[in-house]
Amino acid sequence: MSMLEVARLSKRFGGVTAVDACSLSLQPGSVTGLIGPNGSGKTTVFNLITGFIVKDSGDVRFNGRSIADLGPDRIYALGIGRTFQLARIFPRLTALENMLVPMRRDGLRGLFSRGHRHDERARAMDMLAMMDIAHVAGLLGGSLSYGQRKLLELAAVMMVQPQLVLLDEPAGGVNPALVDRISDHIRALNAQGVSFLLVEHNMPFVMGLCHDVVVLHRGAVLATGTPAEIRANPAVLEAYLGS
Amino acid sequence: MTRVVTSTPVKFGALAVAVVLALLVPVFATDPATTNIAVFTAMYVGLATAWNIMGGYTGYISLGHAAFFGFGAYAFGLVLAHLGIAGGYEPFLFVPVAGALTVVLALGIGWVALRTRAATFVIVTIAMMFMVQLLAENLVGLTGGGAGLSFPVPPWTGDFYNTPFYYAMLLMALVALAVSWWIRRSKFGLGLLAIRDDEDKALAVGVPAHGYKLTAFIVSAALVGMIGALYGYYVTYIYPQFAIDPLIGISIVLMVFLGGLGTLWGPVLGAVILEPAQLWLAYNFGASRLYLVFYAAVFLVVIILMPRGIVPSVTSLIGRVNNRRAVGPSDAAGSATDTHVIVEPAP
């Protein structure tokens, strides 16, 4: 059974069809790339899957359950995490506090317990260490470099062990050395069983990392396949380069 | 940038000294003029601290909290009248009832107002406050309308009159402070601060933002409503423009901004500075509106010199000094262990 099933998802903004009957399917343990020219609807698909915008039609099912009408917090609680195109962290919280914000819905007891319980804190420090940013744990988020913010955002989203993580341009705006580190971190997390759906313009990054690639064009799925199949698909080249 | 963390024994020691000093105020200052200032200062400490739970922690600036203050006063007065409670210590036992009734109002207002954000939220809260004021004016059969509502008159006289009210206000201020501290240390509080920084991001990591904001709003309003109840009993007579006064709401906000928005002690400091100063101006320059000029001047000073308020500015200054001492120029980046110790939430 697919982990995530997007079925004929559509979204219009006024007269513009941003997503047009988009369907895709993700298998557990996969790393899937979602690519397409600018304005093809990639981020809108992310926002629809994670509940940030409401669909016009279609359905999104996660582990067999429809999540199309749930809010972002409920969807996160079910096991779908996400990052944003421009790294978003909480600037007036320390890096460690940023790690402690993500939450499962564990009732009032969890809600009013001290935010930095020992086990949670230890896991947060482990995650920061894994991302090689443990040394900034006590620094305010707003004082971190952009690369550190990217890593912190990825680390924070992993705090409650999501099954699926949607990464919006994880390699965007960071230096090549850090791109390689991010790629390694994604591989390591994937080896632990986390599935990924990522939007990215950096083609070597996508082709080197993803098991499957979905190409969007004008809001609709143009092609689906392995990186090699996508590279050889003339329709994809035309969509990117024009005829 | 790191945060400065004062050790726990020092914090508790300072708190204990402050509480003991506050408890001794009526012992050393017995004249009614001074104890009146003490009553109002304790009242504003509680109000500012309660407001900060919503405005400071979530970043949602409510200028309509005077509605809860006045509503609490009216609810309390009506409960006392309905139950036929006479003046004395017994009415104090019914203050939580005013809080509970204020929760109902806050639930309704919050449910609507918290569907908006930023400036819209500010405007909606102001509008809601004036609606409550209009209701108090027009529901004449219930509130007495413009003629006002009288409370039972306490039997105490002379220099002692203010003392029970002072301790009641002080207790409410301490309750507000304890609630604020508890929230700030909880996962719930961390969620509120996350909402303040970036609400959409908070949603993305599982924070149920609407529920959190509504809870903070209700807790904040309930505390304000209970303090309003004490105020009504203290002044023994209220009318709509007096109890639901926009200036009360603005004063609270100004105090929090002066002391430090979103900090535990900032609202306390702001109230302790501004309220006695305002009353001193009133005593010395009559019942003019000179204190409004003073408020405007303070607001300008805060905006120009300390836009983050006293507590964050001073904390930041101390942090910079400490960092200069602790970190040599050749080790500006610091080590992992340097930063790991400074990870407690801000006070």
Image (cartoon, coloured by chain):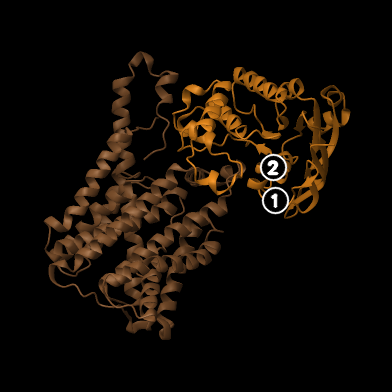
The location of residue B339, given as percent across then percent down, is 42, 24
Image x and y of residue B11, in percent: 30, 38
Q: Left or right: A98 with respect to A77? A: left
- Pick whichever, B90 or B309, lies toward us: B90
The one of A153 and A204 positioned closer to us in this rendering? A153
The quarter of the picture where residue B94 lies is bottom left
User: Looking at the colours in the rendered structure, which chain would you say is drawn in orange?
Assistant: A
Identify whether A170 is placed above or below B299. above
Label 1 lies in what chain? A
Residue B136 position by quadrant: bottom left
Q: Residue at x 51, y 62 (%)?
A: B110
Which chain comes out brown in the rendered image?
A: B
Q: Are marks 2 and 1 in contact (CB under 8 Å)?
A: yes
Which residue is at a point 85% across and 32% down the rendered structure image? A224
- Residue B50 circle label: none
Amino acid at circle 2? Leu
On the image, numbered disc 2 is attached to which residue?
A78
Residue on which disc 1 sits: A70
Q: Is residue A119 above or below residue B88?
A: above
- Using residue B138 as the reference point, say whether residue A37 is left or right of it: right
Q: Chain of mark 2?
A: A
Alpha carbon distance from label 2 to label 1:
10 Å
Residue A70 appears at what percent x and percent y?
Answer: 70, 50
Secondary structure of the residue carrying numbered label 1: loop
